[in-house]
Amino acid sequence: MIKKIIFLLLITAVVATYYILDLGQYVNFEYLKSKQSALNGYYLANKVKTISIYSGVYIIMAMLSLPGATIMTIAGGAIFGLIPGIILVSVSSTLGATMAMMNCRYLFRNAFQERLKPIMNKVNHGVEKDGAVFLFMSRLSPVFPFFLVNAAFAKTYIGAGTYAFVSQIGMLPGTAVFVNAGTQISKLESVGDILSLNMILAFALLGVFPLISKKIVEHLKRRKNMIKSKKPKNYDYNMIVIGAGAGGLVSSYIASAVKAKVALIEKHKMGGDCLNTGCVPSKAIIRSAKMLHYAERAKDWGFDSAEIKYDFAKVMDRVQNVIKKIEPHDSVERYSDLGVNVYEGEAKILDPYRVEVNGEILTTKNIVVATGARPLVPPIPGIEDVQALTSDTLWNIRELPKRLVVVGGGPIGCELAQTFARFGSEVTILEGMNRLLLKEDIEVSDAVRTKFEAEGITVLTGHMVEGFKNDDGAKVVHCDCKPKKLNIECDEIIMALGRKANVTGFGLEELGVEIRKNGTIEVDDFLRTNYPNIYAVGDVTGPYQFTHFAAHQAWYAAVNSLFSPFKKFKTDYRVIPWTTFTDPEVARVEINEQEAIDEGIDFEVTRYGLDDLDRAIADGEDSGFVKVITPKGKDKILGATIVGSHAGDLLTEFVLAMKHGLGLNKILGTIHAYPTMSEANKYLAGNWKKAHAPEELLNWVEKFHTWRR
């Protein structure tokens, strides 16, 4: 800090000297014109010395953002001529500008990055992606003063080398114009003769050119992919959707609703993972396990005891019955009645206009890829020997495993671990990181872990699975829990390490559709791939892998594909809620407390404990909390986390409020039925209001009432 203060004082002293000695009188148009002959003569007699002095002065002036850069540039042409002048000015101005940026960075960047972390995070991301383009635009256009450009980019993480190179190229056209003017200085009456309105407008347009060029290049790159394929004279369909999960079904539904001709192709089961192996079966078995758990808690409701006899196979049959009951909602018949042509078979994208299914080639104006994801099963040694289950395959078992290991402490792993433990399995959950539910706040992870351990689940965090072994029918999991090793015997293993996007086997590789490093399809803000008529939605592209998120994206993909270029919408990723259906449930929308800290937001936390809620007490569910993040002193909701019974249902009020810009005061002013769980949201708003009560005003009100008595 002391070094920075000394450095700042040194710069201040140099700048002050410039103004105190009125050195600016030597850097103006009239002085340059009057001394041109003398300067030319001195240069001819002392070339190296003149070049050194000129370059040094130019660099210092640019570095300290002193006025006179324009006159110095003109002087370069007047003294050295066109080509030498351009070279000298270009090098000197680039060095000076880069040093000015680095000085400003040294003094102020860390403070800006810390104090404005949320804003700077977005700026840094933008600079990383398009910083060179915007710097080039700024350097080309005189609309942006160079000292402001230096100061602005100093707050970012753009490399000094990149900054210098782009600045030099960007300043070159302007440098050439002013140096050339300097060679004709005898014909000029003022700087205004150079900077005419037409010239300024020309530079401004030149500054915007890189951005326009970038957009044109992106467009041409997409169109280049299309040129390779022969465009049909007529199309069989306006849209072909591949995959009948949530994203595919909603895309098809919307297309048919707006009278487009749409085909839906599904190779396995209508409804996708959510209906057949994900949301529906998992919630069905969670419900059965909860009923069993309620029986074990009979004394909490005043009963001496309660006993439930059950057959696990019948529980699993019930799960299948639930699926069958919901199946008609996603069936071929229903979507056929809606006007969707449903094909049951494997799709193969031949080119941007053609999709093959069951030996038939269909032509289409647009394609929506909604192929979803599958359980991620890493190639851990011995994985084939133990025949580990996943969230796709466990629904086929009919015998409850006595000893169960769940690998993965995310939402899927936690839900399944608790469910099987409630049926009587001895469950061990293994998580490589230091806590469960890593995306949630630490206190949320702790609350879930505490409940798990109270129910007899062995929770082992910081345990990395190194391998598996089949030991005469017994399955063994080898763990590394530094500094020791651990072997766990079990009857079944469930792998719950996340999901991997389905991007292979149906033509994307052959087309060259761009795939991100994380294995998902790369799309733009409108959900387009690098082919302008091929869109992707849901788990196959992300960034979230939720059924409701896939459905949300589907609207944008359908509308954008059917009505572009006449109308299109950027996908709105704000206010995305999710729920983990453990007991207690964990529900969340937008940022939590840890993320607010990480982003440097000046925030405050308001809490309400469900142990104080009448309905929760009456129901015997009086544990958990509601927590809301707001800006300091404001009731705007930045994020909400709820842990407790029916947390997913309670969250919706906050989602609605955030979506439509309503704050906690509005929730407080809304009548909530008594006694309901939803009152928790109102009481939280009341806690916020109490914390922000106008104490000084209330003191005067108290005096008023005293006077009236």
Image (spheres, rainbow, N blue to C red):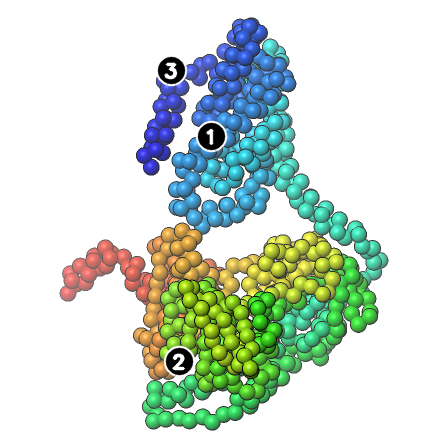
In depth, the one of 184 and 295 nearer the eye is 295
Q: How busy is the neighbourhood of tag 1: few (under 14 within 10 Å), some, or many (20 plus)?
A: many
Q: Quadrant of residue 85?
A: top right
Relative to 394, does residue 112 appear above or below in the rendering?
above
Q: Which residue is mark 3?
A: 21
Q: Amino acid at mark 3?
A: Leu
Is residue 31 visible in the rendered image? The answer is: yes
Q: Which mark is residue 100?
A: 1
Label 3 Cα neighbours within 10 Å, binned few <14 / some 14-19 / many ≥20: few
Q: Amino acid at mark 2?
A: Glu
Q: CA distance from mark 2 to mark 1?
A: 63 Å
* Dot 1 amino acid type: Ala
State if disc 3 and disc 2 touch (CB < 8 Å).
no
> Which structural element holds mark 1?
helix
Farthest residue, direction right: 233
Is label 2 or label 3 in front? 2
Which residue appears at 34% of the width and 66% of the height? 607
Furthest residue toward front: 472
242 or 661: nearer the viewer: 242
